[in-house]
Image: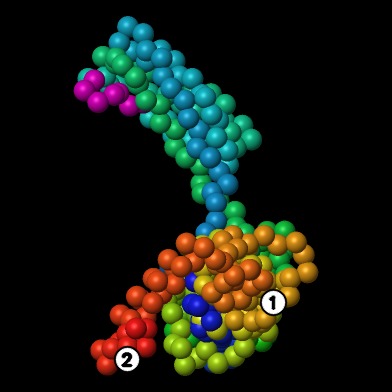
Amino acid sequence: MNATRIKWQLPHFASLLAALISFLPRLQAQIAVPPLVTYHGRLSASGTNYVGTGYFKFAIVNGGTNLNRSAGGYCVTAGGGVSSAVVTDGGSGYTVVPQVTILAPPGSPGAGATAIAAMAGGVVTSVTIQTPGSNYWGGVFLAIAPPPIVYGYTTYWSGNGQLDENGQPTAPLALTVSAGLFQVVLGDAPTAYLPPAIFQHGDAQLRIWFSPTEAGPFQELTPPQRLTATPYAMVAAQAASVQGSNVVGSLPVTTLTDALGAPLWLTNNANFLAGNAAAIFNLSADSLASGTVPDARLSPNVALLNGNQTFTGQNTFRNAGDFLRAIGGRRGCGQPRRRGPKRRAQRRYDSIRESHELRPGERRLRQDRQT
């Protein structure tokens, strides 16, 4: 991490998050959609458009699941004919005895076999072979007709806020039907409030029941009507609770004007900050991979190259001779004057070195003085 880069980008990074947080409530205010859905329908009976007052019930539900199940089984062959049939699954929801068909496998010339089913309590209990047919071989297929489809639904919204034991709203809504056409605004009085959150479900459908009288009975108009894109615009009113993972794209820098008021935690080691980090506190020096630290942030026990130092502990210096010469001059601090051949040789060397450093006129003058 480059400490110099830390000093520039942090305010922008904080502003980015703050702007996103503050921008969403403003977005909500700007695109608020009334929680209403207008539905237009046509009602006819035996090809004739209904005219007059009709009584309707409305509910928004999921896609539904078929509560009934088809029966299944297989056939047993003997001597080229079908000798018996075995029911492996009796199914559910049968209201009448289903039709049974015996099918020869592809390429088989088998034909002529017939059978009949028996049922009890909506379940197929057995299949009896009536005619065995001939020329059957291989896997002979037993086809049992399915029961009527009955859907079970999860209700997201009810027209009057309540459901009876049959999953219908408990009270109808009177509407005027003209030439078979009617219109209703769901979510508007007298219907119940329509929460936009229900359109977070992508399978929302509208169930409708009708009766020419308020007392009923009510008949469901099938199939349920799939709600298209328009009602889902109400989900935009919930933008204040949008997940960060759902934000795609970038925000203009000009919108990043607010400060981040809440603590910001960056726990991923791959994160980095670049820019002015003057507002960062309690940052461990162990986190600095490179860069510089101001002298004012160093411990008073750290020796500075451009300051006077007072050492109160026992210290050991490498190349102590150089250190002493830097303080006490050429001889060193407190050292006695050196004499002897080495000292005379050093003086001759100094004289030769100085003569080479002089200009030609100064060198002759020095030589005259020496002679």
Circle 1 — which element?
loop
Residue placed most toward the observer, 293 or 225:
293
Residue placed most toward the observer, 97 or 246:
246
Tell which circle, 1 or 2, labels the residue nearer the N-terminal end.
Answer: 1
Q: Quadrant of the C terminus?
A: bottom left
Disc sitting over residue 309 in the figure: 1
Instruction: Tell me where the magenta segment starts and ends, as one range.
Output: 102-108
Residue that badge 2 annotates = 365
Circle 2 — which element?
helix
Task: Provide the major secondary structure of the magenta segment.
Answer: loop
What's the residue at 36%, 8% (across, down)?
78
Q: Residue 286: where, in percent of width, then height?
A: 63, 63
The answer to whether any part of residue 156 appears in the image is: no
Q: Quadrant of residue 317?
A: bottom right
The answer to whether any part of residue 69 appears in the image is: yes
Q: Quadrant of residue 276?
A: bottom right
